[in-house]
Structures are given as structure tokens and as C-alpha cells.
Amino acid sequence: MPEKIAIISDVHSNLHALEAVLKDIRQKDCKTILFAGDVVGYGAFPNECCEKLQEVCKIIIQGNHDANLDFKRLDWFNPDAQEALRWTEARLTRPLKSWLLGLPKEWQGEITGRKIYMTHGSPDDPLYAYVMPNTDPKLFGRWLNEKRANVLIMGHTHIPFVRKLTQGLIINAGSVGQPRDGDPRACWIELDLEKLDAQIHRVGYAVERAAEEIQKQGLPKFLAERLFEGI
């Protein structure tokens, strides 16, 4: 039986969402998990999410929040995100902070004969580019050709999509911990490498508990409120 791959991204310290997604992944018998960046930021459980992802993921790359735990580009972030990053940095264990800062910004490899390229933003700007569903397909084609990949995986936008081109497959994994497409359910992608196709899955989770923990920790109120709306 061909191997099924689970792709997740943008957990953002939302342990309740992560646990729900991992349960769904297990139920659908996906043995390999790839993570497209942003373990931390926004949510209330940075250490727990780091440890869980280390335990279950085959590949983990860095997102822009993970990369800025040293505050080098803190001015890039909005005030709520800045406050959450400062809070996160103060609570992460030293080994986990070092691990996050040392993660690679991209990964390229082969699984069951298919060549995969994964980055958080885009191949042109691995940490900060926003690649949306309406991006020019010619750009997708260029990236697939340049990376000599059958599958290109991204995150960062918190808006999932799948595009099939003659050159290969484009995937944005959306967000486990803070969806922004109007659907508050956690998101993950199931990749079928034999058919070279992918399916978006949505998973309900205890949003109320995640939001309550954010507020309990004194993080910005909007970071809790937005979870209910998927914005």
C-alpha cells in the first residue's frame, strides 16, 4: 500500500488544535508527517507543541515566528504578534528556543520516488512571502521547475489550497492553530504520492479551551477571539 503523507503547518502554540489534528491523522493512517513552519507564536502552549512535534514529525522547518525568537525582525510583526513573541520567548526552555532558531528554512527530499520541496513562505522568500490561492500559476510552474520537484509545500498564509499543474502539485497547508479562511476548524493536508493529489481536512477542536488559556496567560484578547471566527 502506498505511503500516505500528512502535511501540517502554523500550529502557533495551540495544543488543543494540534492534538485534535494528530488524532485525525492517526485515524486516517498517515505514517509520515511533514511540518511547514511556525511552531510557536500567538498561543499558550509553546513548549508542549514543540515537544509534540519533535515526537511525531519526520521533517520540521522554520517559520517566521520561530525565526524571530531573537527579536531581530520584531518590527515586521503587528503589535499583538510582537507581544506574543515576547511572551513565548520568556517561557520557552533554553533547549527548545535553540532548536527553533536552528531549524532549516527549507527542505528538499524524496519520498517513495516523488521529489518534494517545502518552505514556509515561498521559494523566493522562505520566511515572509504570502502565497495565496490566486497566485499566478506561471509562478507555481517556475518554482516547480527550478526546484525540480513533483510537490511544492508552503504555509504562512493560514489559508489552505491545492493546485494541480502539469509540472506537479502545489500545496498550502493552511493552519492547525489559527485558521484565517473563515473556518475555525484546524486544518491539515493528506498527500497521496501515488496519485500525486492532495485533500484538505478540517478538524473541530476545543476552541473555547484554547481561547481561555490565551486569555488566562494575559496574551492579547484578539488572539483568543479570532479563533472562534477563523480570521
Image (spheres, helix red, strand yellow):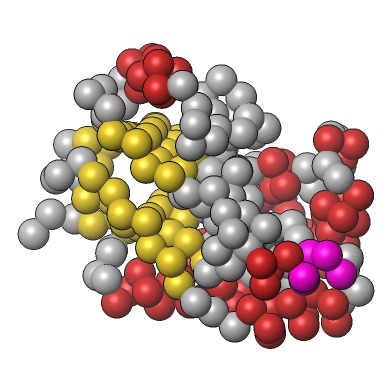
Q: Is residue 188 magenta?
A: no
- Decide if residue 29 is on the left or right side of residue 35: left
User: Toward the viewer: 167 or 61?
Assistant: 167
What quarter of the picture does the N terminus occupy?
bottom left
What quarter of the picture does the C terminus occupy?
bottom right
Number of labels in the image equals 0
Secondary structure mostly seen in the magenta stretch: helix
- In magenta, the rendered stretch is 221-225
Say above or below: 9 vs 216: above
Residue 112 image-quadrant placement: top left
Q: Is residue 177 visible?
A: no
Q: Residue at x 32, y 74 (%)?
A: 26
Q: Residue at x 78, y 42 (%)?
A: 68
Q: Is residue 87 visible?
A: yes
Q: Position of residue 100 (x, y in %)?
A: 66, 50
Q: Position of residue 69 (x, y in %)?
A: 79, 48
Q: Position of residue 165 (x, y in %)?
A: 28, 27
- Decide if residue 39 is on the left or right side of residue 52: right
User: Toward the viewer: 104 or 7?
Assistant: 7
- Decide if residue 54 is on the left or right side of residue 161: right
Q: Residue at x 86, y 45 (%)?
A: 78
Q: Residue at x 29, y 77 (%)?
A: 27
User: Toward the viewer: 130 or 137?
Assistant: 137
Say above or below: 61 vs 21: above
Q: Position of residue 118 (x, y in %)?
A: 44, 37
Say above or below: 201 vs 22: above
Residue 28 image-quadrant placement: bottom left
Residue 207 image-quadrant placement: bottom right
